[in-house]
Image (tube, coloured by chain):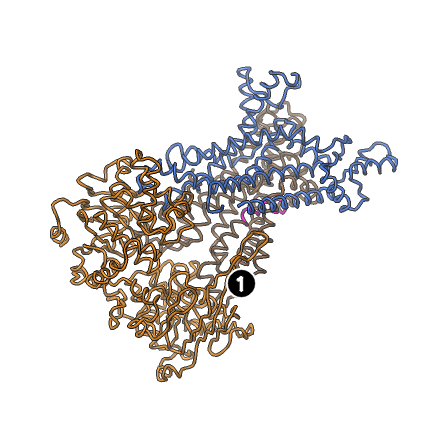
Chain colours: A blue, B brown, C orange
Amino acid sequence: MLRFTLLRILNYVLLAFVATSITYLLAASLMHPQEVLYPPIATKPVPPATAHAYLEARNINPDTPLFARYARWLGDLLHGNLGVTSGTDRAMTPVLDVLAARVPLSLRLVVLGTLLGVVLGIVVGMISAVRRNSIGDVAATGSSFVLLSLPTVVVVLLVQQINQIVINTTGFGLPPTGATNPALPDGSTEQLVYHLQALVMPTIVLALFGMASYSRYMKVTTLDVLGSDYLRTARAKGLTRQLAMRRHGLRMALIPMGQYFAFAVGAAFTGSLFVELMFNWHGIGKFTVHALNSADVNGTAGVVLYAAILTLLSATFADILQGILDPRIR
Amino acid sequence: MTTPGDLRGVTEAAATAEPLVADDPVPELDASTEAALQAGIDPAERIASMSRTELLRRRFLRNPMAWAGMVIFGILVVLAIVMPMIYPHEPYSLDLRADVNTPTADHWFGLTNNGWDTFSRCMHGLRVSLVIGIGTAVLTSIIAILVGTVAGYVGGKGKLGALVDSGLVNLINLFLVIPSLLLLMLFGPILQQASWLWMIPLLAIFSWMLTARVLRAMTQQLVRTEYVEAARFMGVNPVVIVVRHIIPNIASWIIIDTTLGVSAAVLGETGLSFIGFGIERPQVSLGTVLSNYELANPWTWVPAAVILAALVISINLMGEALRDALDPTSGSSRV
Amino acid sequence: MTQNHLSATASPAPLLSVRDLSVTFPSEAGIVRAVQNLSYDVHPGEALAIVGESGSGKSVSSLAVMGLLPRSASISGAVTFAGEDMLHRSDRELSALRGERISMIFQDPLSALTPVFTVGDQVGEVIRIHHPEIPQDKVRARTLELLEAVGIPEPQRRAKQYPHEFSGGMRQRAVIAMAIANEPELIIADEPTTALDVTIQAQVMELLKVAQDMLSAATILITHDLGVVAGFADRVLVMQNAREVESGPVDDVFYRPQQDYTKRLLAAIPRIDAPEVPPEDLLDEGVDIPAPPEDSELAAEPITAIPVDERPVVLEVRDLERVYPIVKGAVVRRKVGEQRAVDGLSMTIRQGECVALVGESGCGKTTTLMEIMQLRRPQGGSIGIGGKDTSTLTRAERAAMRSDVTMVFQDPMASLDPRMPIGDILREPMRVQKYTADRMDERVDWLLRTVGLLPEHAMRYPTEFSGGQRQRIGVARALACDPKLIVLDEPTSALDVTIQAGVLTLLQELKETLGVSYLFVSHDLSVVHHISDRINVMHKGRIVESGPTAEVFADPQHEYTRQLLQAVPIPDPEVERTRRRVKLEESSLAALADSA
């Protein structure tokens, strides 16, 4: 079991490494951060020595071969250094610092949203399957169908618009955008309250999507379980329908859910990108858009590394979960 | 969430793969009533004598959801073709004389703050979204069929086959691990400079993986069936086996997946365009229309959202009705 | 007639009484009547067998008794258990009875146990559900007792294992342990041995009988196999198409069947104890095999004229070996052992001969078959077909040889592509051999008539045919290109017994008129009894006994052959009773444990 898990993790690490490398190489060859030194961005000519130093410091010198730049980035990575932001905005912030500042905010959103979505989805999906064709089932399945037919942005807009209407009519409501209120001092109770209020709408959006897709998966796996022989055996033993489902069915239905979980974090990452953008949260998602818009090679690579590690962790977690639930793969 | 391919694939793996491949003689009985299978007498036989395609067609047409989907989709297609031809305004033409932003007889859905006509933008956007959605879905299915059937077929055939299979599986996993949205954002603007149609292969390249995975599993099951084995023992060429025995048996699933793929691609394109990495000027898509939203003036975004929702829902309704027709036991789709 | 038989053996109060039971399911094409107007009684301690072919409604009726039918089923009639109505009770009330006073054993032991709980937990659960007052350690002790009683060795260790670590027979024993845990008054066994090998089947049936005697519980045995019934039941109820056909004491039904269907059922069973009576389907008139097309090489006369020993050899297998390495590790694979699936197997088939290869699951017969069908150099030993060694073939020769060795598969549902019309299915092998279109058309015609179908069937799809007809199509496909050898892989094991008889008759006639040779692979000695000329008994990758059919049956030399023969149930209550007595003396429950 241990060996197996270690091999799986090794495989994930390898995949994460390859994914990050590919993205770095693509980003480094497709982006042109050096344009900042030339017209039309630069207004006056930059001396060659300055330009060289500028490019070298950021490891974006187009005269250095691509693979040499990659090797340098890789070497730095081994020392825990992700380089500095290298985009068209000339600031030279270490990427690690940017990530460190922004990851907690994004992670809070992703973890909270995913967790809430998964738990609600499992409950709703199971009830839908057991009480198939009841009003609750029809409502739940119908609303998740509609929800999954909408792009994230539309749902965000809907939530925001509703909040706006509430604010317009009652004068009270949730903070429309921003994770923190710049007018309030950091660390104060007011700021904390504001932040908690600000969390509500983004979390609702993420949890809604999580719930919609998870309840669908859960319904399918539960229906499979409901038709199974072992559930019939359990009932033949003298367990009532409900008890048989709770004792034997639930765990069996959860096993395939573990596989979906591995993808959940990736989906939540994408979802959080839209959410952060539209709620104006200074998290990883907003940084991603910024990095890509400003041709920031190191920043992009850093984000990919973060996403890959996130996927890796969730996949490992899913594997472990499955190992606990299912003795057959132990 | 708006990543193409996100909405489908996994569910189907659980829901449709099994019952489809195991070619059940009486597929129309509820799986939970397997007892009824044993009792499969007269009515069941009557059904068995009906061809599968005919059965599928009849079940599909009997479903009101299917009709709703087809009607809405049909209206949208007609609108997308006709409206840009007869409506006087262009997506990026400025009307500086108009003094209100809300709908008027001249500007049916009103104007944005910078003077763009929303209705025209919606119709052009719908057109682009439709082309991209359908094109991407078809291309996605082609890639997925190629990778999925090859991996599934060669997997059990000797050391070399196993090697090719595991190579393809790792390719699938790699594409799943790569944050596809990021690469789309990286490539999108660059390819846009050539033609907006590049959006199609770009989206397709990042959305075939889950379908391919399911197709691989289905092919593996089919390869183990006795009729494929029989063909192999007759000496039938592997390519012929795949084309003649395997693809026809997964065709209905592919059709469903392609249908649902259209809506996934539309959603993906919308998301990308919304954040400015998708369709760019001079083209508009529903995503770019949405990106000009003004909370103060819901007319800027609600029409686009409604059209988008109608489009995706109509496609999904048809897809789900198809799946219901094919496999009534998958309750995932009960609306 | 039914009522007479019932009252003949009736003691005053039946334990279970079913009156006018009907079950219907809604379905796509209207209402499926699964059970219609069924009535029977079961008295305390009595063993009733409900016999019927697939689709006869036999399982549905007992699920209705247990209250385990899906909600979509509508049930009418009356079911009383120990004087109390069963049909109009809540799930909670029925749950109190299930597992306590009535228990059930299901068909497929592989899926009947929840995979994520240990076997011990699942057996113990039955006790815990109904007797929560019993302390944990007592439950555990009782569980071990039960496991030991049903013949699971080392119950201490096995109780902690999960179902997937148990073999099929072992799982069925565990299910029986659950069924007898609370000493129920009625045990319903739904095809308890269908999924099991014949020797395991004998053991499990024996166990059931002993358990029934021990608890003096009434039993309902639901089965398609009249052979199993003969040794077990006191009374028999025969069902067909959702209705009762005939019922009565076991001797009456077997020796003096009243209804045609019962007679047909009995006549169709292949018997190992009566060499002179081949199984037959009384409705099946047999087929007049039309003369093959002129370009065909199939003909019986020139072959049957020559004595068997002098005929040309069709298949020659010498010292065939197939060893699978057992590997562990995902990335770094290392061999931890090997499994000798086929271990030095040799056999010869001459033209016009039918040679049977008989063995239980896992004995290597399927591997042998696959090795032959591959037409490649085997891992060890050699395979010669029509005098040519397969390891020396060129690509073209191998392709040509594909038409010489053909195969009929086990499952007629799975062996025909549902997307192809029958005509195309039959043309497929001919297309590979590059036949002209006219020649193919002519052959398709002939093939369909040969196997008892009509030429116009060529346009239809496999789903439009019944299981027996599909298997005939499979046979036709195997015949398409004048094969030298047809490999039959359990060709009848998926078929109902009356249909099986028809297919066996067809195969027999084909052999006699066309002179084709068969390699008949089967797990069932009785099936090959009448069709094969010689028998090879296979066990653990080796042939343990081989010889002419009559000799092997009359005087089996190897211990394993004797076990196999002894395990085959004989559809004759008299015979089974004497056989069973012998077996019972030999084996107590403890001995059963050893044999497993």
Nearest to the observer: residue A191 or residue B40: A191
Nearest to the observer: residue A81 or residue C30: A81
- On the image, the x and y values in percent for residue B153 come to 53, 58
- On the image, the x and y values in percent for residue B109 come to 57, 29
Q: Is residue B149 magenta?
A: no
Left or right, A40 with reference to C222: right
- Work out which quarter of the rendered image holds the C terminus of chain C and state it: bottom left
Question: Where is mark 1, residue-wise?
Answer: B238
Please name the residue shown 43% across and 81% down the image: C312
- The picture quadrant where one finds residue B265 is top right
- Work out which quarter of the rendered image holds the N terminus of chain C and state it: bottom left
- The picture quadrant where one finds residue B131 is top right
Question: Label 1 is placed on what type of residue?
Answer: Pro
Mark 1 nearby-residue class (10 Å; few <14, some 14–19, many ≥20): some
Left or right, C236 with reference to C4: right
Q: Chain of mark 1?
A: B
